[in-house]
Image (cartoon, grey):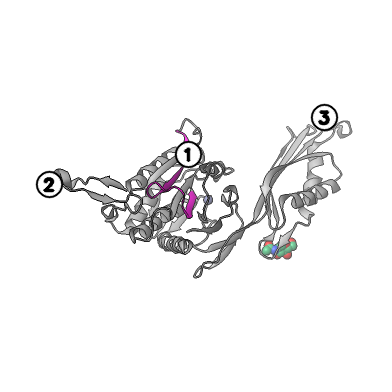
Amino acid sequence: MKLLKLPLLLLLPHLTFTISIDPQQSLYDPALASSSSSSKLLALHKSLVEIESITGHEHDVAQYLVDYLTLQGLTVETQVVGPGLDGRGKRQNLLAYIGQQRKTKVLVSSHIDTVPPFWPYKRKGEEIWGRGTVDAKGSVAAQIIAFEEVWKAGKLGKGDVALLFVVGEEVGGDGMKKANDFGLKWDTVIFGEPTELKLASGHKGISGMVITAKGKAGHSGYPELGRNAIAMLVPALNELLKAELPWSEEYGNTTLNFGTIEGGVAANVIAEEARAQVSIRIADGDPADVEKVLLDAIQKAGQELDVEFHPGYGPIYIDSDVPGFKTIVVNYGTDIPNLKGDHKRYLYGPGTILMAHSDHEHLKISDLETAVKGYKALIEHSLK
Ligand SMILES: *[C@@H]1O[C@H](CO)[C@@H](O)[C@H](O)[C@H]1NC(C)=O
Ligand SMILES: [Zn+2]
């Protein structure tokens, strides 16, 4: 217990008293929540979206959240993940909790970076447009307001729930990987990403592949004197199109995306080098199984090629056992596999991934408001 002198003492010096409160129980200041919670939600969401935070530029939005959450009476720890890009301040994660109890039963988490380019905040009737409105600042704002409302209702105490906001989700997840250094474990982690207000029951795995062909340059009039790298690469890609990749009832087909293909220097020069980058969305098995199928397919082309795989992961099972929620399977990757531990995990948030990353990213205000209710239900369910 800690003794706190109230400012009242200064105003009424003849009434000398102290009030003893447990700062770990509840420091929620109702005065700060005097505006209706919907306008507080919209204002927070607006502030977050207005601050550009493309991966590498997360410093300012993290600092905004540190100030905001501190003002709500939470303890906020920051964790440096790396230097900012383009001369920005350091990139940092933040962990917020009640009092001094950083170890909590439940963690509520999302990411504060966005993909490029930046699109400014714009309110259009009942819609909010702008980069990050959906992915994932809609989740971040709704999670914070949900936390505040459950706290204000007297249903949160020390050791119950912490908030974690990380950088770098859109590029490799270095923020969430670093968050493992907090050295904490939770019973349940609630992740925020656009799931159309449904509980995701799983998402596909992911892997990546780079195929490189090295040939021999020469005059295009004498192909027999050189070796065309593009002509070596293309048959391999053709075999990949025909490959029988693993599938499952739950996650559908494993799919390939030929994302880039490059090679050669001029139409009349035998291409010396060619390369393709392929992303793989895995619906069944682990990456090694899929890699074997892909290598076998490439081999059928009978070309001498260099194949390199990025480290990946298989499909991710997600808990979805909360009554009252519809479920959905999503095809995108998340930070879920980057956070170690055997916690229960939920994935939920407003908006659809089909809007995220697009030039028309926008969110319905009613969805943002519904997400607050959803996160409250998930928090309360997880604390039961
Ligand atoms: C999976 O692939 C098969 C064969 O190409 C196709 O018929 C089927 O529609 C695909 N399933 C889904 C869910 O896309
Ligand atoms: Zn996201």
Q: Nearer the viewer, residue 63 or 380?
A: 380
The disc at residue 12 is 2
The amino acid type of the residue labelled 3 equals His
Where is residue 367 drawn, in percent x and y?
44, 62
* Vertical relation: 184 (above or below) 344: above
The residue labelled by disc 1 is 79
The residue at the point 79 percent across, 54 percent down is 243
Where is residue 295 drawn, in percent x and y?
80, 47
Magenta highlight range? 89-110
The residue labelled by disc 3 is 219
Q: Nearer the viewer, mark 3 or mark 2?
A: 2
Cα separation between marks 2 and 1: 42 Å
Q: Nearer the viewer, residue 177 or 62?
A: 177
The amino acid type of the residue labelled 1 equals Gln
Q: Is residue 155 left or right of residue 108?
A: left
Q: Secondary structure at mark 3?
A: loop
